[in-house]
């Protein structure tokens, strides 16, 4: 027989045998599909943002289907009726979802925050923070290079004059911007109840805080003294709000000499 033909037949035979073996192995070692988990995942939005606390939609779906998780309101990317849909599918009691929104606790933009140096390194907040805390004089403020913008899967974060700004209508409170910020100045706050928000994290004494930013909290306690609900107090040189006690009357906003308190 022609050696070339023999080689072709040999290779073809090996290919057929390997194909048969792979087919048999796929049947023998096949992992049975969790039909309930597949049905749950079908309802989920598929954003895989991790806001539920699991690796992605499939992880949350498997946990619900296997009974390892009973909270049907953990998906932050889904529609308002998703918890009820999941509960009906799984035979669980629907969990009431508390809507939250991410808020940047800094207003130190290019016009208000002092710059201490010209930064020429990697355009990343995390990288810049390792070099003397970044280019801005305030060691607590937004660096403004957009790590949070890149981290947000819902395009809810943007930069405005060197400070991150969050669109509450786009935000799903997945928490990725919170994790991405090396300064820790982004918080997830309840969206249902309006309350005063101190948009500053500077805990330095007033004279130091004023030198680095025009809108920093200086711990003057005017907000504390004028609050009729006893909902705001200054500790460690920074005003802090008890959202449960706050009535959003706006007295603290009106009396803050630095304009670092808003209602949101």
Image (cartoon, grey):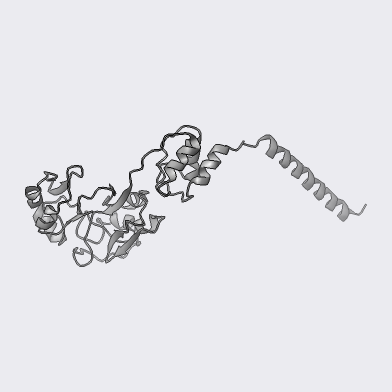
Is residue 202 or residue 75 the one in the foreground? 75
Give the number of callouts. 0
Residue 160 in the image: x percent, y percent? 29, 65
Residue at the image point whose x is 11% and y is 53% from the top: 251
Which residue appears at 51% of the width and 41% of the height? 40
Q: Is residue 197 above or below residue 214?
A: above
User: Can residue 166 be seen here?
Assistant: yes
Q: Is residue 19 above or below residue 215?
A: above
| 89 relative position to 71: left or right | right
Towards the viewer: 247 or 103: 247
Name the image quarter holding residue 171.
bottom left
Q: Is residue 83 left or right of residue 220?
A: right
Question: Is any part of residue 54 visible from this angle?
Answer: no
User: Residue 79 at what x, y percent from top left?
Assistant: 42, 49
Rendered residue at 87%/51% (across/down): 6
Coordinates of residue 223 in the picture (x, y in percent): 10, 51
Residue 147: image location, x then y, percent: 35, 57
Of all residues, the one furthest to the top in this rendering is 67
Q: Determine the image quadrant of residue 36.
A: top right
């Amino acid at each position: 027989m022609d050696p070339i033909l023999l080689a072709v037949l040999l290779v073809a035979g090996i290919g057929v045998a390997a194909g048969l073996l792979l087919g048999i192995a796929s049947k023998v070692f096949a992992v049975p599909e969790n039909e309930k988990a597949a049905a749950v995942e079908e309802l989920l939005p598929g954003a895989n943002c991790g806001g539920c606390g699991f690796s992605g939609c499939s992880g949350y779906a498997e946990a619900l289907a296997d009974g390892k998780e009973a909270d049907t309101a953990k998906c932050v990317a889904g529609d308002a009726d998703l918890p009820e849909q999941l509960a009906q599918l799984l035979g669980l009691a629907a969990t009431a979802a508390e809507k939250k929104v991410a808020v940047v606790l800094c207003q130190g933009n290019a016009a208000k925050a002092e710059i201490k140096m010209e930064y020429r390194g990697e355009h990343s907040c995390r990288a810049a923070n390792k070099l003397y805390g970044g280019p801005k004089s305030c060691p607590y403020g937004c660096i403004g290079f957009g790590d949070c913008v890149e981290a947000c899967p819902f395009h809810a974060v943007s930069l405005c004059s060197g400070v991150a700004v969050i669109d509450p209508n786009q935000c799903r409170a997945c928490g990725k911007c919170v994790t991405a910020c090396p300064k820790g100045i982004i918080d997830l706050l309840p969206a249902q109840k309006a309350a005063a928000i101190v948009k500053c994290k500077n805990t330095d004494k007033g004279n130091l805080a004023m030198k680095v930013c025009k809108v920093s909290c200086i711990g003057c306690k005017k907000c504390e003294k004028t609050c009729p609900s006893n909902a705001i107090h200054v500790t460690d040189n920074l005003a802090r709000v008890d959202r449960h006690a706050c009535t959003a009357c706006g007295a603290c906003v009106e009396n803050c000499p630095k304009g670092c308190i808003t209602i949101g």
